[in-house]
Each structure stands twice: as C-alpha cells, then as structure tokens.
Image (spheres, rainbow, N blue to C red):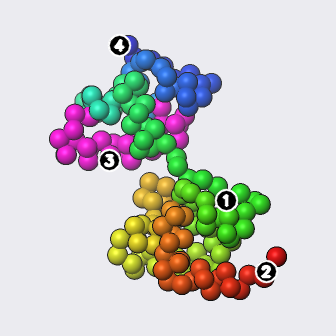
Amino acid sequence: MKFGKVNPEWTVDELLEQQCIFYLKDICDLLEIKAESVKKKAVEFEQRGVDIWEELGLRRLWTHWIVRMQNFRSFYNEQLRPRVRTVQKDWDMKALLQAQGVFLLTEVCRLIPVTPNQMRYRARTVPEAQTTIGVWKDDDMKVYLVDIQVFAEWLRKEQLLQDLEDEEPEA
C-alpha cells in the first residue's frame, strides 16, 4: 500500500475508490468533513475496543492521522456522508410530512406554522429530543435538524397535525 496524493479534480466517489493511504488533512476538503469530528469518532470507537485501522481505516501516526481508503470508504458512507435532504420547492406541508429523511429545521419551518425558535427551545428542553420529537442540534454541522418521520409522529401525538390539517382549505 502506498501513500497517495489527492487530485483536486477528483469527485468524492473517485477519491473513495482509490487504493491508497492518504493524510486525513488532505481529504477533508474534498469530502466536506471536519478532521476534528472524524478524530472524535475514531477515539469513540477506539474506546469501545474497535480496531480503528481495520474497521475504519484510520490510524494515528505520531501527530498525523492517516486514512486507508479501502477501509475508510464504508465508514464514510455510513457515518460521515452528509445525509441532509432539501425541501423541494413544490412541496406543501402534507408532502413534507410524508417524506422520509433528515432536513434542516429552518427549511421545515417554512412549511409548517411553527417558528424555528419554538422548535429549538423544545429541542433543548425535551429529554431525548432526537428520538422523542425528531429535532436536535447536530454538533458537527452546528445546525438544528429534523427527522421528519419522528417529527410527524410527534405532531400527531400532540394533536398539532390534526389542528393544522383542519385549518387547511379543502381543494
């Protein structure tokens, strides 16, 4: 296995297909990840007894972190690849609440009559907000996210969705 140099013209998928070892600092820009968050996750796995070189393709070599791309590829796709979807312009509230995935809170609040401030407050005060109401602050991205399936279910439980659907004019 040899050390590779990142070609700035590669796409993300082309970089992930390489059979080389890279310095972590060199791949972060192209993969749109923060080295600190990758190192933090690696340390968490290491503390759980996981061999991070074999499982994640990461290793600390003196003061540098190196990446074995063939192993790192699956870790990146499962844990690090951005998973935030965008709200489509032609969606209404019902289409949004029937969608699947994770969205930015600010985009979700454009289609529902709840302000982002109200939901951020709820996310800070409700225990286990990510699993209870589907809203949480992502530490890496520094933004509030919404798991729309959990959020829609919470709206139904709180009977907020019923009230909102009753207010909508019939088509």
Along the line of sight, the residue nearer the viewer: 99 or 40: 99
Could you tell me the amino acid type at mark 4? Met
Dot 1 or dot 4, earlier in sequence: 4
Could you tell me the amino acid type at mark 2? Glu
Dot 1 or dot 3, earlier in sequence: 3
Number of marks present in the image shown: 4
Mark 1: few, some, or many residues within 10 Å (few <14, many ≥20)? Answer: some
Mark 3: few, some, or many residues within 10 Å (few <14, many ≥20)? Answer: few
Residue hosting label 4: 1
Q: Which residues are magenta?
A: 27-52
Residue hosting label 2: 170
Q: Separation of disc 1 and disc 4 at Cα?
A: 42 Å
Dot 4 or dot 2, earlier in sequence: 4
Front: mark 1 or 3 = 1
> In the image, is residue 68 above or below residue 90?
above
Does the rendering let one see residue 40? yes
Front: mark 1 or 4 = 1
Residue hosting label 1: 87
The label shown at residue 110 is none
Q: Separation of disc 4 and disc 2 at Cα?
A: 64 Å
Front: mark 4 or 2 = 2
> In the image, is residue 22 above or below residue 45?
above
Q: Classify residue 17 as left or right of residue 55.
A: right
